[in-house]
Amino acid sequence: MNVWNRIIAISLGIVLCLGVVHAAEPAEVERFVNARIEIGEMMTNYFKGGSGYGDGQRPSQEQMRQMGADINAKLTALLAKHDLTLEEYRQRSPDVFADDAAVKQYLAEHPDLKQRYEALPLDRMGRGGSTGRGY
């Protein structure tokens, strides 16, 4: 019985250490939260008012490709201000935003950013169970 208790204690210690190692650093939380706010505002402005494709009409495949390239170029430039690449942001942001306590603490320290963050559309920013791209 004593051996099993030690194995459990060691396993629990390893799991707790891994959780601490994967916790987001405050500087990283700051970069990603600020980037997400700017991305959300940029995307909201980008799609504000629609593009006038008509009553329920969708853009053509070519227009969709052009729009995707334009959005990626704008995202790349925006993320460069935060010393991030598009790929790095897409890979790391789920981990950073999974640390809900760190994000909430950062936003609590910056009420102006908290207001902007909370104004973002929930369904497109990877919050609220979205299946979207989650910028």
Image (spheres, grey):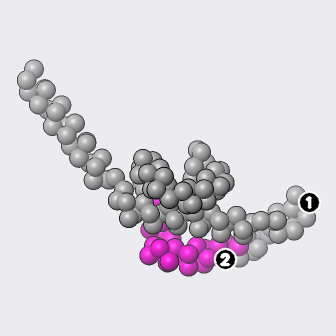
- Which secondary structure class fits the magenta region best? helix
Residue tagged 1: 55
Q: Which mark is residue 70?
A: 2
Query: How far from the left and from the top, in percent, is residue 27?
Result: 38, 64
The residue drawn where x is 50% and y is 77% is 81
Q: Furthest-top residue in view?
A: 1
Give whichever of discs 2 and 1 has the lower sequence position.
Answer: 1
Q: In which quarter of the image is the C terminus?
A: bottom right
Q: Which amino acid does label 2 sit on?
A: Asp
Q: In which quarter of the image is the N terminus?
A: top left
Q: Mark 2: give few (<14), some (14-19) or many (20+) Cα within 10 Å.
A: few
Please say whether residue 87 is one of the residues in the magenta stretch: yes
Please say whether residue 47 is one of the residues in the magenta stretch: no
The residue drawn where x is 46% and y is 56% is 109
The residue drawn where x is 56% and y is 75% is 78
Q: What residue type is labelled 1?
A: Asp
Lateral position of residue 21 relative to residue 99, left or right: left
Query: How far from the left and from the top, in percent, is residue 56?
Result: 88, 58
Query: How far from the left and from the top, in percent, is residue 116?
Result: 61, 59
Disc 2 element: helix
Q: Can residue 92 be seen in this view?
A: no
Q: Mark 1: give few (<14), some (14-19) or many (20+) Cα within 10 Å.
A: few
Query: How far from the left and from the top, in percent, is residue 44?
Result: 70, 64
Lateral position of residue 132 relative to residue 27, left or right: right
Lateral position of residue 99 relative to residue 2, left or right: right
Q: Which of 31 and 92 is in front in this view?
A: 31
Q: Magenta stretch?
A: 67-94
The residue drawn where x is 72% and y is 68% is 45
Q: Is residue 114 visible?
A: yes
